[in-house]
Amino acid sequence: MISGRKYFIGFILVFAFWLWPPAAQGQSPKRVNLLQFAAAERGETVALDLLLTVSDGNGRAFAQPAVESATVQIAGNPPMEAQIEAVQTDAYIALLLDTSVTMEAHIAQVRETAKAALDNAPANAYIAVIQFDEQDRMLVNFTNDHNQVRGAIDQIKVIPYPITTCLYDAVFNTIGLLNRSMPNPQARRAVVLVTDGKDELHDRREACTRTHSDMMAVAVPAAAPGTPIYAVGYCRDVPCSNVDRSELHNLALDTAAVSAVVEPSALEEALRNMMDHLSFQWAARAEVAARQGRNDVTLSVKLRDDDQPLTATFSFNSTRNIPAAPLSESNPEPDPPTRLEIPRLELGSLSYDEARNLYSLSLGIANPQAVDRLFVTVEAEGGVLALEKIVTVNAQPTRQVDFEASTLAAGQRYIVTVSALDGQGRLIELQDNDDLVPVRKVKEFEHAPAPQAAVDYTVESVNANYETEQLMIDLDIESAEPELIYDGYIVDESGQRIFDLSRNLLNSTRLVEPLPVAMKQAVGAQKFQVAIYLSTRDGRRFGPQNYEFKVQPPAPPGLLYRIWTALNIPPVWITAVFILLCLSGWLLLKNRQHAELNFGQPGSGLRPPMD
């Protein structure tokens, strides 16, 4: 009996352990996140400088991890000790908040959670606040006064008319602001992005001038520190269909940051976690040996409470063999590395897809294993930069480079330049007599798209509806363009602008706008003039088409109606008063008639007049 009871208790314990939450069985796994690294050849060693954070399995940063030691190890070499310490340098953080029209119902919560998250920001952080929809607007430039930052956040508001979320443009411009504002280009920097949408119009077509490639070219430049983009997606519904999860995840991953897609209740926690990642960063430094060419490195961080170290991997290229210590029996000479041949580039055809407004450049790479990335620029004559982008090689002997022509001017000649870069983003150079010449190729071309058909349109009529307080503008349009955007303005007889028609998608030949205040307050017939512009998706703008029209406000109401309106007398009261007046009149009339009938009769008390 006792034996059976023991088996039963044992079964219950095993079953309970199996059902118990994982957190009770063991701590959430930790990980080390390598944010940035730099490798510099200095004499007989390579100096590695690393920036990292330690987080749990849910991506939350540890404030003060008990770091016992750290090492870096190049494949084939013994591990080398690394010095590790908490980072104390200034941080420049751009808080980039989506205020497009879809955020109108949620903007109050975003304001409050953003202010709360400032409690977790680094004490030495300089913070700027930028709101964006189809345009980005800086509310406060980088400042260490966090109370001033809170005041700027309180100013955030949603402008109801834009239907566009220009995400790529906003990030591109914000990184440009960081580049211009930071006194030290090597200082810590980051963008904290909160958005509930994608880079598109409501009909799910790309809406803005900057592309994903443009954004990534400045976020991860070829020869300068990158900008981590901490991305938070704000869900408006349960499946969170309004947010592109994979894009936000990859945006953070490619820039050595973290991302989160959250429901409204979890927004504050997500923003605080982003600030924790910026507050609790560590710097590691080590001197290592290196082989010529690619070197694969493993970073190991040992925490006091953990048996196994946390690891992260990265790689860098070295121009030569660099021994870190004299060779001995305990440190024998390593096997000679495979020699990487100098790569060469060959540019092929350059084709233009007019329907997509896109150029495609084919190229060949001899010895592609020596190339990490390609740096592509397009410049107008005179050296004016039109665009730039980074293309990964992945040891492929052929690549196709695509770039959009939206920033190119028709009839202008351009030079496309392709340069080979190593793993550190440096130009790969080859010896030419006494000079070092970059591995680079150029190609000239003229941007000559077929002439685009003009958009023919006129304004047919303008009518003011004073009952619905709307202004109807009818257009006559002849165009093959699948999508048009309109905007414009209205002026009075003196030429003073009284109303602006905001940029909006043209869904009908009838534009319906709110009746301007000046027309509501007009006394008698007055003349106005409307100017309408139309624009295409590729940025071509037509107009304005002007139309003069007259509005005739309704005649002012009569005196009794105005008194009634001013007194705000309910209709039922008016009816009751009318009935009482009628009844009083009827009674007076009946009394008068009765008095006349009884006049001079005995007992009436009335006597006829005496002479």
Image: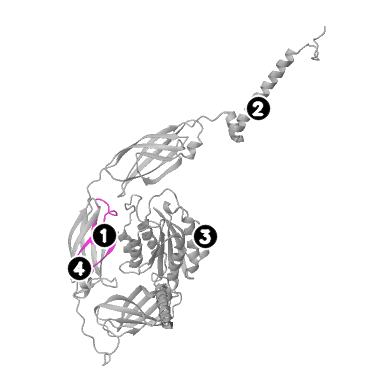
Contact, mark 4 vs mark 2 (Cβ under 8 Å): no
- Quadrant in the picture for residue 500: top left
Percent across and percent down for residue 118 are 49, 66
At mark 1, the secondary structure is: strand
Which residue is identified by label 2? Answer: 580
Write the residue at 46% across / 68% down: 125
Closer to the camera in the image, 569 or 286: 569
Q: Report the residue that reaches farthest toward the front.
A: 1
Q: Amino acid at mark 1?
A: Val
- Quadrant in the picture for residue 73: bottom left
Inter-mark Cα distance, 3 to 2: 62 Å
Q: Amino acid at mark 2?
A: Leu
Which residue is identified by label 4? Answer: 396
Q: Is residue 588 left or right of residue 112?
A: right
The tag earlier along the polypeptide, 1 or 4, is 1
Q: Amino acid at mark 4?
A: Gln
Which residue is identified by label 3? Answer: 151
Percent across and percent down for residue 292 are 24, 79
Frontmost of labels 4 and 2 is 2
At mark 2, the secondary structure is: helix
Residue 15 on the magenta segment = no
Dot 1 surroundings within 10 Å: few (below 14), some, or many (20 or more)? many
The tag earlier along the polypeptide, 4 or 2, is 4
Find residue 378 and name its label: 1
Q: Which quadrant is home to the N terminus?
A: bottom left
Frontmost of labels 3 and 2 is 2
Contact, mark 1 vs mark 2 (Cβ under 8 Å): no
Tell me which segment is drawn in magenta: 388-416
Percent across and percent down for residue 447 are 23, 53
